[in-house]
Image (tube, rainbow, N blue to C red):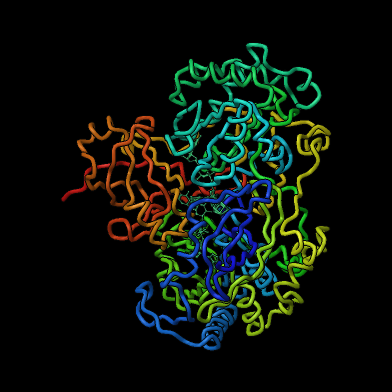
Amino acid sequence: MDAPIPIGHSACPHDCPSTCALDVELLDAKRIGRVRGAKDNSYTAGVICAKVARYGERIHHPDRVLTPLRRVGEKGSGNFEPISWDDALDITAEAFLNAEDSYGPEAVWPYYFAGTMGLLMRDGINRLRHAKKYSGILNTICTPLAQSGFVAGAGKLMGPDPRELAKSDLVVIWGTNPVATQVNVMTHATRARKERGAKIAVVDVYRNATMEQADIALLIRPGSDGALACAIMHVLFRDGHANREYLGKFADCPDSFESHLNDKTPEWAAAITGLPAGEIEAFAKLIGQTPKSYFRCGYGFTRSRNGAVNMHAVTCIPTVTGAWAHEGGGAFFNSGGIYHWDKTMIEGLDVADPAVRNLDQSRIGPVLTGDAFDIGDGPPVTGLFIQNMNPVTVAPEQRKVKQGFAREDLFTCVHEQFMTETAKWADIVLPATMFLEHDDLYQGGGHQHILLGPKLVEAPGECRSNHDVICALSKRLGAAHPGFAMSARELIDWTLQASGWGDLANLEANKWIDCQPDFETAHYLNGFAWPDGKFRFRPDWDTIPIHIALPLGPVGDMPPMPDHWAVTEEADAAHPFRLVTAPARNYLNTTFTETPTSQKREGAPKAMIHPDDLATLAIAEGDKIAMGNGRGQIGLAATAFDGVRRGVVIVEAIPANNKFERGDGLNTLTGADQPAPRGGAVFHDTHVWIRKASP
Ligand SMILES: Nc1nc2c(c(=O)[nH]1)N[C@H]1C(S)=C(S)[C@@H](COP(=O)(O)OP(=O)(O)OC[C@H]3O[C@@H](n4cnc5c(=O)[nH]c(N)nc54)[C@H](O)[C@@H]3O)O[C@H]1N2
Ligand SMILES: Nc1nc2c(c(=O)[nH]1)N[C@H]1C(S)=C(S)[C@@H](COP(=O)(O)OP(=O)(O)OC[C@H]3O[C@@H](n4cnc5c(=O)[nH]c(N)nc54)[C@H](O)[C@@H]3O)O[C@H]1N2
Ligand code: SF4
Ligand SMILES: [Mo]
């Protein structure tokens, strides 16, 4: 009999709320086999997505960057030659020192996001930034709209145990597509259906894979969730389903909120959402009759200019019914608020200088093209150091992003696993390890575990980890901090201990730590996380405690209580369609756009358009179309899809730019304006025109 294949334990590093606990087959010192979800982790429960199960395709991909590279052709040409690590680091350090000499340290911008969610490999770049007083980055591209909307009411980024979905009688999946984007939500939700006959409701703007599985499908127009939530609460108050005892104890202003909702009738919401009033009535009734209603809120419905208001409105619903008080009830978005990390050593917070400017990550196009809104009297960015992000594909206003990267006076170093479209614009490309090749520490967003991801296999070629590269650069740049002298394992150990989560040896022995707060705390039964303990129907948008340092947006215009806030980029005569760029199942942002199975399953990008709209436009199935607005235009194929309201079009994200005509990618069309109250990116809030492409 063959010996069993050894199994290594890890955590999925990708930017997905599921942060699955993984069991990895280790074929030898360098090669992995199948990846499976850990059965003994109570949230992962043995289930992971297909793209990570076949991780061998990605980690052993023939196109991985294996050596440092120097550009030899024109910027953006993609022509490079291999060079040594020493030369690559020397060239990079010299360019950043030159930038500093010419304009001061703020001319260098360390730019990163969550290509890896490892606390050390993702956030360690901030140690270099703080030690050198380089420009800071506001991480706006994903979460601030959702976070500020959730925290506006409850006061904290925390909610009922996500595993309690299985104890719910009505699971409301609102503006997330977990079948594609966080599969474990479905594990627990379908358990509730199987074991207790729970209903699963889905609120979305297209019939996605999750809505296909729903008992109740609420198909609405983009950006109209606030209206739907208000009408539901109107019915709850009207029909005696408001829990007045709970409201008296736990809410700030239930009476004025009730009057505020007087005219927010189902008919009013029907006109805004596109849902028939009868469907709204029936859904509201079901919520009113189901104390254990669990609102599992996603990011998707917050990626609009009114997204924070809409998230807040949805979290008000379980407050009106008192569902928060029940096991299997309440609202959940993310458990980021429970971890009390001390990241001093990882991020060099002890040497941070608050006077140094911060630049908005989502506005990298305007920043690099010198927009006065971002740069003001400050220096231009002439040095860019990028880890874990692919802004040339993922950031809005792509034309400006490319114009910026093309600047001859900009030096760009990209540390990457693949020759991404951003790496192609670099002057120096450095080869990066993957998660199984380095040590790191992870936290669940959609659950409540801290997990260890230790190094399990040797890296190919000359790949180095983010931490190693930052430490090597710090020497050449004269950046001082004790963290630069520590190994990855030492930093993990230090961080766990300083944060009160034991030490590395303990985590290594146990694989993860379940950090779920006790029932009373998680359900806010000791009060919501404000001084008076009351949920806020009337938020103070000026003072929401989220971890984004962005100066306030135009909060003055925000509605005082939940409402339909009509600030989205609405369709008009010149742009009759609303474009939503929801995540594709086989890609994870741009990760896996390089693996053969994902490429095959996704195929060429398609615009999913209602058949009646196609008929009006005289466009046939498979025709090439042009789609555009004031920011630019893209070319792709059209396909008929009746799972949207008329006037709404879906293109699943994020295909490589070169899958579109002329290489103008999807984010050519999306806007980079800063939404209230703290910025964010509005990827699902775009108006466009559509026409048949001329042959
Ligand atoms: N149109 C549209 N645009 C969107 C979105 C959308 O829905 N629609 N979604 C937005 C959202 S929510 C997000 S979060 C962003 C995500 O945008 P990105 O953060 O750019 O996307 P990812 O593909 O997750 O990761 C980027 C890169 O990180 C690299 N990477 C992974 N691990 C490591 C590592 O350890 N070291 C180094 N050096 N590199 C590593 C990967 O190879 C990958 O190329 O995109 C946004 N853009
Ligand atoms: N397969 C896969 N998994 C992923 C990702 C991926 O790209 N692909 N991305 C990862 C990242 S970075 C993140 S942040 C998470 C995001 O995870 P989600 O929260 O699931 O993703 P979103 O982009 O936020 O979009 C989710 C859903 O919101 C819907 N939506 C858009 N606008 C509206 C609206 O106005 N109202 C309502 N009700 N629904 C709306 C979209 O149609 C989509 O079905 O997923 C992660 N997981
Ligand atoms: S579901 Fe998300 S966290 Fe789990 S393996 Fe897939 S990408 Fe990773
Ligand atoms: Mo994200």
| Residue 541 pos. (x, y %) | 67, 39
| Residue 480 pos. (x, y %) | 73, 79
The number of numbered discs placed on residues in the rendered structure image is 0
Horizontal side of residue 287 vs 61, given as left or right: right
| Residue 693 pos. (x, y %) | 21, 48
Along the line of sight, which residue is nearer the eye, 522 or 528?
522
**Quadrant of the image occupied by residue 174:** top right
Residue furthest front as drawn: 1
Residue furthest left as drawn: 695
**Quadrant of the image occupied by residue 172:** top right
Quadrant in the picture for the N terminus: bottom right
Whether residue 256 is situated above or below residue 195 in the rendered picture: above
Horizontal side of residue 681 vs 491, given as left or right: left
**What's the residue at 76%, 26% (across, down)?**
251
Whether residue 576 is situated above or below residue 99 in the rendered picture: above
**What's the residue at 79%, 21% (across, down)?**
248
**What's the residue at 69%, 52% (across, down)?**
547
Horizontal side of residue 128 vs 402, given as left or right: right
**Quadrant of the image occupied by residue 100:** bottom right
| Residue 183 pos. (x, y %) | 55, 45
Q: Can residue 561 be seen?
A: no
Along the line of sight, which residue is nearer the eye, 584 or 155?
584
Q: Can residue 227 be seen?
A: yes
Residue furthest top as drawn: 239
